[in-house]
Amino acid sequence: MIQLFTSLISFFVGILVIPIIIKIIKKKNILDKPGGRKIHKEAIPSMGGIGIFLAMLAGLALSLNLEELSQIRFLLLGSGVMFVLGLQDDLVELTPLQKLLGQLFAISIVVVLGDIRVSSFYGFLGVGELPLWLSYSLTIFTVVGLTNAFNLVDGLDGLAGTLSLISFLFLGAWFLLTGFHVYGVLALSVSGGILAFMVYNWHPAKIFMGDTGSLTIGFLMAILAIFFVEANGVKLNENHYLKFQAPITAGLALVLVSCIDTLRVFVKRIRNGKPPMAADKSHVHHFLMRMNMRHDQVAIVLGLIKLGFLFLVISFASYSDNLLLPMVVGGVIGLCLFLDAVTLKKVKKIAKSSPRILELSSSQPMDMEQRRRRESVMEKETA
């Protein structure tokens, strides 16, 4: 029964640890300062991922015995490497190559030594079991992509926590109900740490996740999503009532918002002649912010969208990937077009109601709200 309290254990540890981390970071003056693409307007402590990671370890230590912990030893080792990598990047910014090499090392530990990988396409487009080299390559590529996609979506108070909490709670419940006990406890322990972090990260945030958190959580979410896909594809009994007949689509739903947002941004940048990794404010949460939504409202909207796609996948769990994947992809494309249209309409309305630049310069100085509106409108018009 102790596994049912895993989330609570992690939550209370996180609640106790994170305020201490905030005080230490402030004392050391290791703050995330505003400027550039950053939306916050004052220096905020980062590296909240330390609290999440410690809370997760506490939950695992009090919920699993040594034999059970040994089953996920390579996953924990890879997570530790990713945690140290993110911590180092928060303290002394690493080069993209250094980050990539560190990620490949952490991921290879889990994929090669832990043997958590995509072994098949499970009948999608008529493709079954994959050659070992392709299985390793595809899995490593997927985890690198998903980890960094989650890192990119961590741009607003409460957003990364909301999206990841939904995935880990779903995975924790599913793993426990289908007999994958250790993975269920792991997912729930992460959930508790994230929930504790969100108490201090909800708008207005007192601490940010930092790469320490976003890389570690993105990595864990990607690995557990792949194990979930593999469990549905080949490990779970064919007649189990919780089996998804479209494992690839079900796994995609767990990482949908960050994955699709990153692909959408890359395509838009390439179409505009910009490098895909160029920094800008074209992510979906930036679009919603231009509609005068607050951080918490954006987090709730995107969380509800993610829940909506999860509900869709659950409702059509008996469908194959050949049928369900086009439905989900079509829904995503339609939603993106709708959001773009609504945002553009809203921005134009704000532009009409905002004072012209010459009017502002000839009268009183712009206040902060007017300045933010003008910058948003100008950025949208030049995008």
Image (cartoon, rainbow, N blue to C red):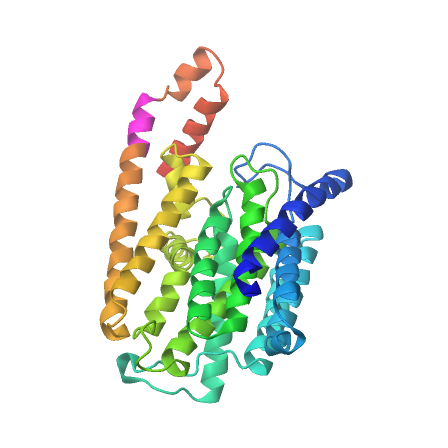
x 44%, y 79%: residue: 118
The magenta segment is 347-353
**Left or right side of 277 for 264:** left
Magenta part, dominant SS: helix
x 60%, y 61%: residue: 96
Q: Does the segment drawn in magenta span residue 350?
A: yes
Q: Residue lying farthest top?
A: 363
Task: Measuring from the top left, give residue 329's x and y in whole percent.
Answer: 28, 62
Q: Is residue 156 above or below residue 277?
A: above
Whether residue 217 appears in this view of the structure is no
Q: Is residue 307 above or below residue 233?
A: above
**The quadrant where residue 64 appears:** bottom right
Task: Measuring from the top left, give residue 115's x and y in whole percent.
Answer: 54, 82
**The quadrant where residue 200 appears:** top right
Task: Measuring from the top left, give residue 338's x and y in whole percent.
Answer: 25, 46
Whether residue 295 appears in this view of the structure is yes
x 49%, y 86%: residue: 133
Q: Is residue 154 above or below residue 136?
A: above
**Left or right side of 16 for 184:** left
Q: Is residue 357 above or below residue 207?
A: above
Q: Residue lying farthest right?
A: 28
- Please state, as top left, top right, bottom left or bottom right, where the C terminus lies in the image: top left
- Please state, as top left, top right, bottom left or bottom right, where the N terminus lies in the image: bottom right
